[in-house]
């Protein structure tokens, strides 16, 4: 994996040029990718968090909404429609010059899409995925970001008075590849503008980072889920990520299928599996939900929940080891204690779909969160 340094970003990959035409077999067999340092970070552009592609200047061949589909892009070589090959991504028509004497597009020509993040956040990494766009990918891309109301309309964002910060300047990308960039701008953003030069197709856009919630909103709510991704909770570590990631346990809503939760491999020893979380900031947990939705023959058999105050604090029990039922919501009222971290242990293995830790921020937690968000706004 090669890197290219720039003030606002580092190109983590250097894929360039066309991929070979599809010749049959598995369509991902010659897909170009690299090991990326984004494991454990939230995809701020996850549709499940409320993200959306709210506008694009052109989507002639393939709809802009495909950019944020959670699953990898799929390819069906036999799928053609009235406008041509049906692609799983965002694809624009071919640009042309202004006349027979000037048939090529101007070097500045580009197509653009406006993306609303699901939650405000500090962006740490961006992946512009051109999977299956082998000869019809853009020559280059750029990404800008701004902070606005999450409910802003496209015309609000395109107003001349809106300030956009360049995260990735115009940079060449490769076809049928995972083009990845680390971002070095310590600011809170809500929207992105993806440009592709001069035209072409992008399969997926991933925007990895840290959630930066609105302290005023959480303060007014009073009681909320202190560990939810959308509120700024995070997974710090987990014993096992074999079947599905532990971050799923703090996504919004209930799980809709088995792989929408966290499931570990089968243990053949006497140990147990666990997830450690960091709360949005110091808070007091008063009620707990452990959900095993859609985990029926593979839910955890038992679970215990712990909390601690501070990275070096002592773990204290919130919920003693209890039996879990498959495909069931389990609710517990707990002895309220100040906490910054939580840990769920499951025995011996299996999984849970969601964990909810309802409570409120302490006075110190409220002040620290407000100070932290003010520093990046």
Image: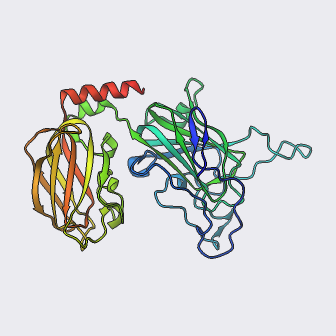
Q: Is residue 150 left or right of residue 338?
A: right
Q: How many marks?
A: 0
**Quadrant of the rendered structure where residue 254 is?**
bottom left
Query: x, y percentage for residue 148?
Result: 46, 31
Residue at 36% x, 28% y is: 373
Residue at 54% x, 32% y is: 157
Q: Is residue 344 left or right of residue 332?
A: right
Query: x, y percentage for residue 364?
Result: 21, 27
In this rendering, the answer to whether 77 lies above or below 119 is: below
Residue at 21% x, 35% y is: 282
Q: Is residue 196 left or right of residue 294?
A: right
Query: x, y percentage for residue 56?
Result: 60, 45
Query: x, y percentage for residue 293?
Result: 25, 63
In the displayed orientation, state which residue is furthest to the bottom.
Answer: 25
Choose between 225 and 349: the one closer to the eye: 349
The C terminus - image quarter = top left
**Quadrant of the rendered structure where residue 77 is?**
bottom right
Colouring scheme applied when the structure was drawn: rainbow
Choose between 90 and 287: the one closer to the eye: 287
Residue at 74% x, 40% y is: 109
Q: Is residue 346 visible?
A: yes
In the displayed orientation, state which residue is furthest to the right.
Answer: 101
Q: Is residue 216 visible?
A: no
Choose between 109 and 168: the one closer to the eye: 168
């Amino acid at each position: 994996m090669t890197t290219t340094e720039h003030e606002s970003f580092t190109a983590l990959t250097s894929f360039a040029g066309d991929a070979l035409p599809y010749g049959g077999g598995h369509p991902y067999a010659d897909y170009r990718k690299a090991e990326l340092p984004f494991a454990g970070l939230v995809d701020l552009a996850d549709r499940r968090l409320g993200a959306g592609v709210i506008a694009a200047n052109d989507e002639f061949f393939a709809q802009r909404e495909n950019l944020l589909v959670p699953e990898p892009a799929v390819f069906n070589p036999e799928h053609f429609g009235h406008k041509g090959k049906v692609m799983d991504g965002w694809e624009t028509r071919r640009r042309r010059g202004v006349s027979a004497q000037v048939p090529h597009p101007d070097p500045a020509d580009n197509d653009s899409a406006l993306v609303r993040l699901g939650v405000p956040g500090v962006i740490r990494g961006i992946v512009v995925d051109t999977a299956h766009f082998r000869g019809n990918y853009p020559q280059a891309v750029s990404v800008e970001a701004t902070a606005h109301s999450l409910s802003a309309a496209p015309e609000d964002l395109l107003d001349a008075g809106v300030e956009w910060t360049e995260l990735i300047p115009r940079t060449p990308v490769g076809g049928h590849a995972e083009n990845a960039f680390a971002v070095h701008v310590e600011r809170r953003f809500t929207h992105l503008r993806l440009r592709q030069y001069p035209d072409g197709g992008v399969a997926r856009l991933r925007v990895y980072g840290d959630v930066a919630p609105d302290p005023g909103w959480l303060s007014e709510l009073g009681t909320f889920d202190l560990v939810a991704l959308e509120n700024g909770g995070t997974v710090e570590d987990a014993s096992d990520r074999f079947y599905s990631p532990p971050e799923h346990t703090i996504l919004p809503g209930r799980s809709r299928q088995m792989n929408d939760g966290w499931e570990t491999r089968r243990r053949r020893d006497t140990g147990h599996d666990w997830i450690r979380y960091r709360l949005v900031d110091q808070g007091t947990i008063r009620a707990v939900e452990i959900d095993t939705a859609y985990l029926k023959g593979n839910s955890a058999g038992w679970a215990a929940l712990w909390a601690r105050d501070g990275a070096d604090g002592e773990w204290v029990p919130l919920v003693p080891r209890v039996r879990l039922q498959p495909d069931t919501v389990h609710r517990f009222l707990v002895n309220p204690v100040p906490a910054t971290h939580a840990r769920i242990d499951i025995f011996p293995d299996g999984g849970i779909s969601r964990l909810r830790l309802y409570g409120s921020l302490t006075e110190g937690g409220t002040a620290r969160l407000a100070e932290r968000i003010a520093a990046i706004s």
